[in-house]
Image: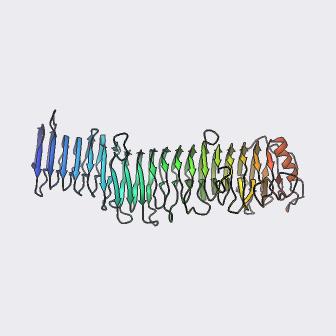
Amino acid sequence: MNLNTGTASFTFDSLESTSSSGTPVIDINGVGGSMSVTNGAGTDTSISGAATGIDITNSTGSASFSFADTSVSSSSTGVNLASSGSATFTFDSLSITTTNSNGLDADSSGTLNVTGSGNTVTSGTATAVRIKDTTIGASGVTFRSISSSGGSATGIILDNTGTTAGLTVTGDGSTAASGGTIASKSGGDGSTTTGIGIFLNNTMSPSFSFMQLNGFSNFAIRGTTVTGFTLANSVINGVNGSSTAANEGSVSFDDLLGSASFTNNTIEGGLEDNVVVINDTGTLDRMTVSGGTIGLNSTASGNDGISVESRLSSTLKLSVLGTTFTGARGDMVQCNAVDNSTLDCVIRDNTFNNTHTNIVSGGGGVTISGGGATANINLTYDVSGSTAGAQTIRGPKGFAITANAVTGAGTMTGTIRNNHIGVPGVPGSGSSEGGGILAAAAGTVTHTVTIDGNRVRRIGLGGGTASGVDIVANVDNPGGLRPQMNATVTNNDVAELEGTGGFAGMNLTVAGNGTENGILCVEVRNNEFDASGGSTAGNAVFLSQFNAASNYNFPGYTGSPNGEFAFACAVGTASADLGTFLTTTNGNTLINGPFPFPAGTGVSATSVCGVSGTGTSCP
């Protein structure tokens, strides 16, 4: 069929056409009006040949083209729609099979709808679906499966598809890879048309279920300015990425907005990150990762399992719920806020077991961080089990959990609760080189944290100074402000410190750089801190202070403000008095290591100056 210019007004019950030449089987150019192929009961449209199956270009006016029950088999492009900016195209029950040529290719072609539950595209090594500068209509574009393997062409490309609806790949609802396989794509770094499984730019609500993606020289999924995203019951594995300079990996988004969900997937094999989202603008409310597995990344170049970062004035929210992590060279999860951004991270009821063979020094756990020299962040977090031990962490090299505002200004507020770190009796399982939990603040950030109901075992085997709970306040007091590190530490159980690195049950530090003058307020109740397992450990609780202007507040404390060997104030009896206060008044159990100093008390606070007891609790 060849229609060239003019205005159509055709309705066909069905079409069957074959071409063996280079001319498209259905060739419509410069035509307006309307054309529909209805395919009534018992009929369908079958198009096959060596040339393009359906080729509609340069449509005029508000042309309308509709095809029902259409099967295209071609050794060239299956369906080509081009330069038809005001036209509307609707396909219902569409099947496309090509031999190493694009399946569905829509470029600058008005509005596109593909409806029905059984639509499929298989395109050999070529791009299976490409929708560029074309609006996906209100009915959406839905396929049961999309497949493309080998060669270099990106499998799916959605580029500037409007804000009405999106592409959905459903699978059959139960079978692995029933949504199609996209695999083994090579291409130059920075390319969006080669070397990628799925490329998304300026698109709305793409959804992919029951898909298999593996083996990409750039990314399995790469997205920029995507509003809404779903990946469910899918597998991303193999090796994804070849360039650390291009920060390549498995799944990578810049400016993922709206809401996003990752449900019951297996994602691994990233050269750097397995999943990374970096937002410079707008709001992501919220990205939810639930169920499934985040697996290992590259042995030599791997970074994080999941990494999110909010920048500039963006807002980003993340929940990771009930997911299994088998390891990462960097952190298994990292949340980072910089500039003037807002970030909320909920990490709850997950299983973290870092089996990576090349974890970087200080890495391998869960990290919540934020700040920067000119930053003013708003960071909230919850790293918790819903019940005792519902979240487990084992195998990191550094701290199992880190919550640290590194510098700058702003607020950081969070909860670390009901985590079981390490495995009783398993050497190094809590951390091979670091401690259990680190909460810290620097600059003029006010950090408020509740650390409650955690169990820490088997830290310190690799040396260093490993403690079950570390709290550090390197905060400053500019312009009359009094920034603080506020920590409520209750119902925690720290034991089985080991090796030469097992240092203390709880280690507290103020003014670590020697110049700060902020406050560490710490309320400590009903914990058990047992340092007896560390071969060189001292007191159960250790306090350091490097500047007399920066000090501690233990609400309700009435003992001596100064330590026995204070260097910047009159000496006192703070170690003994704090030991009595923490045990007798606040119900803690303190068990020292083999080398306590001073002996006879569970606390070493020999260098402190100006310990106060203001209030009944920390802010």
Please indicate, yes or no, whether residue 519 appears anywhere in the rendered image. yes
Instruction: Residue at 31% x, 41% y: name it.
Output: 140
* 576 shown above or below 174: below
Image location (x, y in percent) of residue 124? 26, 56
Instruction: Residue at 61% x, 56% y: name it.
Output: 396
Instruction: Residue at 39% x, 65% y: name it.
Output: 189
Image location (x, y in percent) of residue 511? 74, 59
Q: Tell me how the rendering is colored.
A: rainbow
- In this rendered view, identify the residue nearer to me: 25 or 466: 466
Image location (x, y in percent) of residue 519? 75, 52
* 492 shown above or below 107: above
Outermost residue, front direction?
425
Q: Is residue 144 left or right of residue 525?
A: left
Image location (x, y in percent) of residue 257? 45, 47
Outermost residue, top direction?
41
Where on the picture, by quarter, is residue 584? top right
Count of picture labels:
0
Please indicate, yes or no, whether residue 338 appears anywhere in the rendered image. no
* 273 shown above or below 618: below
